[in-house]
Image (cartoon, rainbow, N blue to C red):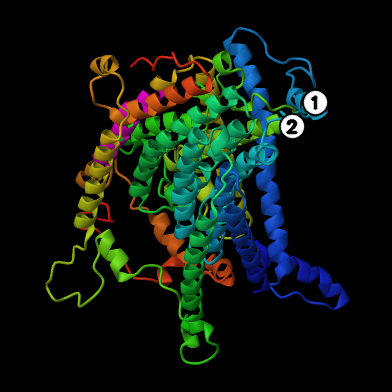
Amino acid sequence: MAPTINWALDLLVGWVGLSIPPDAAVGYVLAALVQVGMILNLAAVGGLVFIWLERKIAGRIQDRLGPTRVGGRFGWLQTVADGLKLLTKEDLMPTSADSLLFRVAPYIGVAASVAAFVALPFAGGPHPFVVQRLDIAVFFVLAVLGLEVFSIILAGYSSASKWSLFGAMREAAQVVSYEVPLGLCAVVPVMLAGSMDLVTVGDVQRGGFWNWHVLNDPFTLIVFCVYFTCATASVNRAPFDLAEAESELVGGFHTEYSGMRWSFFFLAEYSSMLLVSLLAAILFLGAWHGPVPLGMNGEGWLGSVVGLGVANYLGNLLGLACLMTKGVFLVIIMMWVRWSMPRLRIDQVMTTCLKYCTPLAAVCFLGATAWQAAFPAGLLWRPPTPGLVEISEQKTSPGGAAARSQGREPLEAIGYALPPLRGFSTEAPQ
Amino acid sequence: MIWHSVLFTLFAAIACGFAMAVVFTSNVVRMAFYLVISLSATSGLFFLAGADFVGAMQLMIYVGGTLVLLIFGVMLTAQQRFVQMRPSRSEVLLAGLLGAALLVLLASAAVGVPTWRGSGPKAAALDEPPLTATPIALGLLGFRVDGDPDDGQNRAGYLLPFEIISVHLLVVLVGAAYLARTRLTAGSLAQQPPGGFEQDAAEDRIAEVEAIAADSPGTEGPPT
């Protein structure tokens, strides 16, 4: 993106006789600002929409209408009205609170959940929509997502209130436990794709819904369910929202917060919901590829048009729409679960994690590995992933130019070549 | 590129500044929080150097794992009189000596980096692309890349011994957790036979602390 911006700027300042080289710093700064702005807006606007959606869904499930008045027929502007109300509320802090940590805590949560979007691709192919394509994107997203717990622990501790402290301790115990099955579940699609790069993980699922990792074998179907359960728990949603159990802990970790600081916790919660849902869609549900193959040789979808220019861009936009549809669908399921299920007790939460989710994830991991060794081509016939070859070729030609200009060599050019795993064939039997 | 230097200076300043803040503050909880920032800035340095995997490892293991447990422990133990640390003079002296010795060691190692000695044949090593994996690391992952590939030896690497050691360590940890488990009264032990100790220990701990914080010593443990 930066060379393009520099090229456009060069065209502009060319009128007055100046020139800007393609690797000028100004292009990188502008590109970074644009990308950060887009991600922040995704989190903020996503929060606005999801809070409204949550009210509507809660209303429907409880046989009422939800917001109906603000901003027209469906109450579209209800969240904006809520935001204005929160802005005008008095900002209170308990006198015995640790003032520094009390102030900092809400921002840590927002920063962690927004930072994880940096490595999340929104469309794939040779020119993916991603801020920073990392070779270890899955790992990065999970690592950054784990930092969000600090916000809740620090908020709970610094409030100097026993309700807050209870909430924070429950949250710490819960998050540390649920990271284990969550990581185990994320390993399975990584193993199927043979890469921790989310763009590659998404692109090996091209073709049709029968190529999606969730339908690869029975074990991955269970792994997807376990992942979704653990993701719900790790973003602190009902029925796992022990940290803010208002029936017993007043408000849990945010008991002492009011106004905008309080709303930052919810911004972080809703953007993390979107994040884990998008990650689930990329890992298991075919990412940006549609359910039926269209276009390119009958094996790609419109979202994976190979080539440069407008066609590729439009294809990527379609892929983006497809991915967002899947992500929002999963978020809606989380809301549906929240308003249908009663909250678990703390011992039930720990039992669910340690006695059910972790063993199930471990067994399914072994099962998926064995299945992959027995049926390397999957249960149904699977095209021998032509996209991977195209991408690795593209990476060294035009698409790799941007990577090289940032001083990063393509992965294949450095290090040792890995020999293929014994017993694992990279080609499907004909 | 100058932006690299600017970002490096920024991250390094954050890492060093908050590392010093860890030393100079006397509040235990703030110490833990400053350590979070310092270690996160260190992972930023790794990302800046292009070592994405090490950076993410730093975030996941040190920041997300160790420090969560550290803050958890601090939260449980740092009640009223333990929140502020007041080290004695001899402790300060000992810690200062140890710190100075480590600083000398680190400084000599840093000065000893060959590529920092200006131009010359060793500085040319900078132009070579950095390796992302070393033979020993690949050996631990199950691939031997050292030596002649056609010498007919077993080239399976050290994955199996590595995994056996890992499982062994896990068993040791589980055993330690079992031995260190808080012994309850005879009555509650009879009701709760050993087994599922990790979960029980966590629950017991939470129940205990909730009981302490709620100032009601009669609180019973959670039903199992």
Q: Residue at x 26, y 34 (%)?
A: B178
Contact (Cβ within 8 Å) of mark 1 with mark 2:
yes
Q: Provide the major secondary structure of the magenta segment.
A: helix
Kind of residue at badge 1? Lys
Residue B220 percent across, percent down from the top left: 40, 14
Residue A420: tell me if it is visible. Answer: no
Please tell me how crowded label 1 is: few (under 14), some (14-19), or many (20+) other residues with Cα within 10 Å: few
Q: Which of marks 1 and 2 is nearer the N terminus?
A: 1
Give the quadrant of residue B188: top left
Q: Which labelled disc corresponds to residue A89?
A: 1
Kind of residue at badge 2? Met
Residue B83 percent across, percent down from the top left: 57, 39
Residue B138 percent across, percent down from the top left: 30, 65
Residue B125: tell me if it is visible. Answer: yes
Q: Nearer the viewer, residue A49 or B80?
A: B80
Q: Give the range drawn in magenta.
A: A349-368
The residue that label 2 is drawn on is A260
Q: Is mark 1 on a helix, strand or loop?
A: loop
Give the quadrant of residue B119: bottom right
Q: Taking A328 as reference, is A308 above or below it?
A: below
Give the quadrant of residue B183: top left
